[in-house]
Image (cartoon, rainbow, N blue to C red):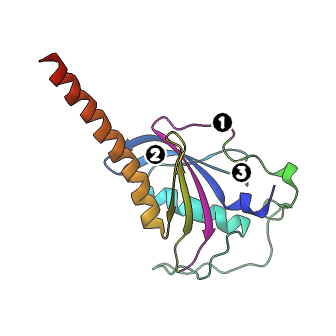
């Protein structure tokens, strides 16, 4: 397993309603998927995974309104695991699929407090590059819009045929 596998994330979306989604996140650093129940939870969880793997490294630290936690040099046993040994990492996603959609994300850079990389919609075998987290989320949302439009087109065609 290469260092690039640390930048690959699997997103299984099990529920989608008007831009809000729920599902699971798969990474090579965790043996079990992380769950999310909103877009902000999805983004924060993926960012936390990248911080744990220290790849891709962020070029800047995000600010917040709360007190900044002190950075400690001592790492827990979980954080000290040897990520260069592929037997200690689980494969990203295996055969997991979302009930609504499944996406593979490869983040190549974390610059300007955002992500840059590639998003692959696995069910449709389509791939798009993104330059920010917002653009990535808009791409995911557009996949659901495309599915909704296709479903309404097919129901309209069925009505025309039945007339």
Q: Residues within 10 Å of mark 3 (few under 14, many from 20)?
A: some
The percent coordinates of residue 147 (x first, y second) are 36, 40
Q: Is mark 1 in CB contact (under 8 Å) with mark 3?
A: no
How many numbered discs sit on the rendered protein?
Answer: 3
Question: Could you say which is closer to the camera, residue 130 or residue 73?
Answer: 130
Task: Kindly give the residue lying farthest to the left in the view shown.
Answer: 163
Residue beneath disc 2: 22
Which of the two discs, 1 and 3, sits closer to the camera? 1
SS under mark 2: strand
Could you say whether the residue bearing mark 1 is in a helix, strand or loop? loop
Q: Position of residue 37 (x, y in %)?
A: 46, 49
* Label 1 packing within 10 angstroms: few (<14), some (14-19), many (20+): few
**Residue 144 spot, x, y in % from top left:** 37, 45
Image quadrant of residue 49?
A: bottom right
Depth check: 21 or 105 in front?
105
Distance in Å between CA atoms under marks 3 and 2? 19 Å
Please report the residue visible at 54 percent of the width from the left and 51 percent of the height from the top.
120
Asked whether, in this view, residue 155 is left or right of residue 119, the answer is left
The residue that appears at 63% across and 68% down in the rendered structure is: 108
At 72% from the left edge and 65% from the top edge, which residue is drawn? 53
> Earlier along the polypeptide chain: callout 1 or callout 3?
3
Residue range corresponding to the magenta coloring: 94-111
Q: Kindly identify which residue carries mark 3.
A: 30
Disc 2 to disc 1, how far (Cα)? 19 Å
- Residue occupied by mark 1: 95
105 falls in the magenta region:
yes
Tell me the CA gap for discs 1 and 3: 15 Å
Compared to 162, does 15 lie above or below?
below
Residue extending furthest front?
161
């Amino acid at each position: 397993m290469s260092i690039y596998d640390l930048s690959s994330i699997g997103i299984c979306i099990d529920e989608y309603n008007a831009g809000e989604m729920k599902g699971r996140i798969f990474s090579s650093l965790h043996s079990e998927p992380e769950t999310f129940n909103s877009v902000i939870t999805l983004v924060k969880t993926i960012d936390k995974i990248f911080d744990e793997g220290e790849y891709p490294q962020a070029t800047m630290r995000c600010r917040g309104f709360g007190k900044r936690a002190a950075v400690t040099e001592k790492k827990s046993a979980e954080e000290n695991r040897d990520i260069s040994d592929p037997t200690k990492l689980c494969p990203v996603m295996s055969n997991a699929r979302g009930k609504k959609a499944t996406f593979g994300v490869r983040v190549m850079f974390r610059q300007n407090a955002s992500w840059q990389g590639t998003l692959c919609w696995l069910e449709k075998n389509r791939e798009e590059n993104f330059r920010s987290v917002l653009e990535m989320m808009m791409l995911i949302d557009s996949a659901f819009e495309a599915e909704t439009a296709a479903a309404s087109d097919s129901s309209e065609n069925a009505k025309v045929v039945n007339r």
